[in-house]
Every structure is written in C-alpha cells, then in structure tokens.
Image (cartoon, rainbow, N blue to C red):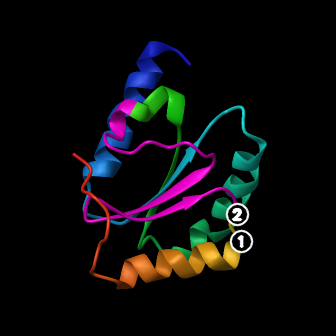
C-alpha cells in the first residue's frame, strides 16, 4: 500500500471512530488465518443490519495508533463501538449467530461499559 492510500484509509478510519453511528470494527493481523474466518462471518451479516451499524476492518500493525488505550493481543478482535466508546470486545472467532446477538445488544443498549476512544 502506498503512503497516499494509507493516509486516505487513516482519515476514513478516524471518521468512523469519531462518528456517533455504531461501528463494528474488525481488528486483524494480516498473518492470522482466523481473521479470514471472522471476515467471512462479518460479510455475511453486513447486509442484515440495514445501515444501522457501520462495519470496517483494519490491520492492527498499520493502524494501532488510531486505537489509543486499546491493546489488542489476540486476532481477530472485533470491537463494537457505540457513542465513541467500546461497548463490547470479542477476541478470537465467534459464530455468526453470536456476533449478530452481540451487535444487536449494543445497538439497543444505552449503557457502555468500556472507555471512550480519544
């Protein structure tokens, strides 16, 4: 990836993180085979949310500076972000059904139990 496209991606990610619209963020490592599995699941449920939640994927090594205070050690990690706060953190693989349930819970729940992303 060239520097220009990397900067464009960084700007887009910053916009997603600063938006008040809920975000399902897949944090992956390019070397992790499990990231491919979770990406397949996310792609399958993407259309089922009728634009009520935004979905994005990032490579942790490239964009970790955009996630201050979040130390991802397991890949893939899915962050469900609502009102600029991490509401749920899912480490490793998860079934399609359980991911949908957690995403719906975040969309309906006004309580957030994690720190705000600055």
Q: Are marks 1 and 2 in contact (CB under 8 Å)?
A: yes
User: Can you tell which quarter of the image residue 113 is in?
Assistant: bottom left
Q: Nearer the viewer, residue 20 or 68?
A: 68
Classify mark 1: residues with Cα within 10 Å, few (<14), some (14-19) or many (20+): few
Q: Which residue is mark 2?
A: 41
Q: Which mark is residue 95?
A: 1
Residue extending furthest top?
3
Give left or right: position of 19 versus 67: left
Range of residues picked out in magenta: 65-93
Classify mark 2: residues with Cα within 10 Å, few (<14), some (14-19) or many (20+): some
Image coordinates for residue 17, horizontal then vertical, percent:
32, 50
Question: Which secondary structure lies at badge 2?
Answer: helix
User: Can you tell which quarter of the image residue 101 is in?
Assistant: bottom right
- Give the residue drawn at x 25%, y 65%: 83
- Give the residue drawn at x 44%, y 42%: 71
Q: Nearer the viewer, residue 47 or 70?
A: 70
Quadrant holding the C terminus: top left
Quadrant holding the N terminus: top right
């Amino acid at each position: 990836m060239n520097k220009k496209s990397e900067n464009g991606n960084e700007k887009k990610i910053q916009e997603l993180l600063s938006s008040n619209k809920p975000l399902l963020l897949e944090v992956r490592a390019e070397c992790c085979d499990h990231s491919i599995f979770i990406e397949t699941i996310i792609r399958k449920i993407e259309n089922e949310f009728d634009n009520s939640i935004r979905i994005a994927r990032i490579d942790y090594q490239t964009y970790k500076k955009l996630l201050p205070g979040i130390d991802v050690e397991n890949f893939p990690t899915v962050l469900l972000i609502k009102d600029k706060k991490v509401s749920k953190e899912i480490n490793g693989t998860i079934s399609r059904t359980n991911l949908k349930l957690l995403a719906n819970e975040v969309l309906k729940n006004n309580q957030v139990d994690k720190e705000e992303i600055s």
